[in-house]
Image: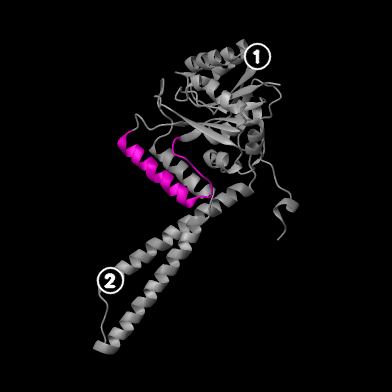
Amino acid sequence: MTELSVVIPCYNEDEVIGRFHRAVLKELEDLGISFEICYVDDGSRDATRLHLREFARLDNRVRYLSFSRNFGKEAAILAGLRTCSGDAAILMDADLQHPPSLIPKMLELHRQGYDQVVAQRDRAGDGLLRTLVSKVYYRLMRRCIDVQLVDGQGDFRLLSRKAVQAVISLPESNRFSKGIFSWIGFDTVSFSYKNAERAAGRSKWGGRRLLNYGIDGLLSFNSRPLRLVIHLGTLLFLTALGYTGWIFVSTLMTGVRTPGYVTLIAVITGLSGVQLTTLGVIGEYVGRIYGESKHRPHYVVHEASDLQAPAVVPPPVRSRSEVGTR
């Protein structure tokens, strides 16, 4: 059986994929173990798939999948973990921001008995605004969600076969890998490494994508936003009740008085904003339930080095005995 699999999701990495492949291949060959490299092309629009096809043709230790379109990095991670067969799997990006030189250290820690070995990057080189937003976000996440997230810990990690099986057994379509890795547990160790720049090309994670990814993380592992809506509604009700009582007592003591127009408009506008926000939070959860209920596959494979790879891999559907009856 293969000792180590390296799983690499990639999207439009034509400029750097050759340099990355040579670097990771050198590190793996120096280890003197059996290995495989599993690329997942997430519907790239450049020549990335052509490079992967050539890698697989020249080296039978290289495997690849290519999606029919861009399904997102979460789907690519899942596909790679489903494809790999090693006793352990290392997840890493193809832009060389995850240094291949750290692979021996991760494998050494795994041999000490850890099921998850996490490489945690520092914030050196990040802008002041991005660093501040990141710290605030992770502090908020630690307070709000039901799993532990650490700033700087991402997808660059080693998973044992037990951990891989646990990750791919989870059936949800709206996947947030950082939360999933924390949720499955197992013995985990982390170490820090210096933040590295992209070797070439541009980051695929702009401000909008990062914001949406942050919202996914906030909603995927807790229902606290719904509870917050209940608390906010209760607070507004008690505030309105107190205001009504104040007007009633004031009327008895000083006579009839008419509240000002500005006050009335402010109250209506404030309540309307709260109602729309509440509907948005509820709608987000309902939309996720709707998406899960359709049981669509996480991805569709367009091309694969392994001819037996299925074109469509549906998510597992739980039986009524597993989810309970109503």
Residue drawn 74% across and 49% down?
319
Start-end of magenta stretch: 127-152
Badge 1 or badge 2: first in the primary sequence: 1
Q: Pointer 2: residues within 10 angstroms few (<14), some, or many (20+)? A: few
Q: Which quadrant holds the N terminus? A: top right
Q: Real-space Cα distance between discs 1 and 2?
A: 74 Å
Q: Position of residue 62 (x, y in %)?
A: 61, 17
Q: Position of residue 18 (x, y in %)?
A: 49, 15
- Which mark, residue 141? none
Q: Nearer the viewer, residue 236 or 133?
A: 133
Placement of 86 over or under 230, stated as above or below: above
**Residue occupying the far front of the picture:** 112
Q: Is residue 322 left or right of residue 171?
A: right
Element carrying mark 2: helix
Viewer can see residue 168: yes
Q: Pointer 1: residues within 10 angstroms few (<14), some, or many (20+)? A: few
Residue that carries the numbered disc 2 in the rendered image:
263
Q: Name the residue type under label 1.
A: Asn
Q: Name the residue type under label 2.
A: Thr
Q: Position of residue 115 (x, y in %)?
A: 61, 33
Quadrant of residue 171 in the image?
A: top right
Q: How is the image coloured?
A: one colour
131 within the magenta span: yes
Placement of 152 over or under 66, stated as above or below: below
Q: Position of residue 223 (x, y in %)?
A: 53, 55
135 within the magenta span: yes
**Residue occupying the far right of the picture:** 321
Residue drawn 59% across and 15% down?
31
Mark toward the viewer: 1 or 2: 1
- Which mark, residue 60? 1
